[in-house]
Amino acid sequence: MTKEEFSTLCQSHRLTQVEPTRFAGEERGYPIALTWAGKKSISMSIPASKDAQKLYSGALKTELAERTGKALSAAWGDGYLTIYINTVKIADPYCQGVTAALDILRNIGLTVPDRCQVCGGSGCDAAIPRGAAYTPVHRSCLVSAVAGAKSKAEDSLRSGSYITGIIGAVLGMLVGIIPSTLTIIFANKIYVLLFAIIPFCIYSGYNLLRGKKNYAALVLSIVLSIVGVYALNYISFIYSFMDTLGEYYSLTFKETLTILPALIGSGELFVEITKSSDFIYCLIFVAAGIFLTWGRISRTAASDIKGMDKLSASAIPYGANMADDYIPDMSDYSQNGDFH
């Protein structure tokens, strides 16, 4: 099935295009999201909890195998269920794939509760994306939630402070380097994996002390992460230096402290640390930490507002009645009939 054929198929069943190769809508009382997965396959996702996975995964696997052979298969995700439909093995991907799968789900008892994700009430009239699937909501609840989130983001821009944000970021950096400092002192080692938590601690400190929610948080997270790497390498050197002088030259702690300022202030130590392999390894893991937390530290009030607008625009109509009176005729989808 080509992209064009997939698009035509979805439009013919009154589904709404939400992405270039993704459509969403309601079928058999289920909120569904259909995705083109190549010429040989399409996928259908519905919301499903972990409890549903425990209750129905075995029965679903058995039913799909018995009734569709290898034409349909299931995969559970975090909060959703995806049915993969092999478009080569069936003649009609929608009737023999989508509706057949939904009838099997209803037959084993797996339905989508008509419960709004915002207020928990019934009678939903819209659905919004959540992970790979679409989940029911009240449109009025969605409008209210979006307005509240946008107001909070706008307030962050107005009331946030660079001064308190910087203080929070510095404090966050200090908290982030504490684990590595302890390993240097008590184990005489640097565990580079611990460096990955530094960017997250910096951003958390900035956010906790209500820094302005713009790209300052991102810049500070990167700059102070590098500062933290230098600080830890300095700490490691100083600790080893003092230990060595005390052991081999019998210098007291006070005598050692008088030597350090001149050594550190010369700039030679800075150059040596920058050229060291330990410093490079630490930077690599800090970069990994920045990558892993990028979605959080790169968020700004503007991006939050844009995200809320996108969420609101992505809502699709969803019927208030869940078609409880629908009784499927499973004989239409037996292996001896349409599937081959």
Image (cartoon, grey):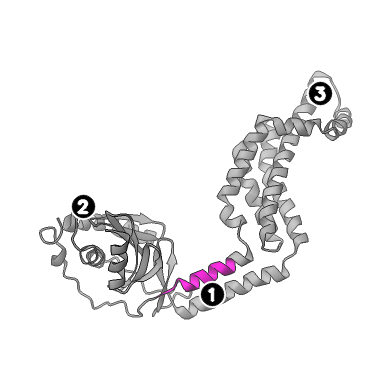
Bounds of the magenta segment? 304-316
Q: Residue 107 at x, y = what percent?
A: 22, 66
In this picture, residue 16 sits left or right of residue 220: left
In this picture, residue 240 sits left or right of residue 295: right
Question: Which residue is farthest top?
Answer: 248
In this picture, residue 154 sits left or right of residue 112: right
Q: Residue 59 at x, y = what percent?
A: 24, 57
Label 3 belongs to which residue?
245
Of the two numbered discs 2 and 1 in the rendering, the one whose residue sits closer to the viewer? 2
Res. 231 image quadrant: top right
Report, in whole angstroms, how far the alpha carbon at label 3 lies from the one at label 1: 62 Å
Callout 3 amino acid: Leu
Q: Residue 76 at x, y = what percent?
A: 35, 55
Question: Which residue is farthest left?
Answer: 336
Label 1 belongs to which residue?
145
Of the two numbered discs 3 and 1 in the rendering, the one whose residue sits closer to the viewer? 1
Callout 2 amino acid: Lys
Report, in whole angstroms, how far the alpha carbon at label 2 lies from the one at label 1: 42 Å
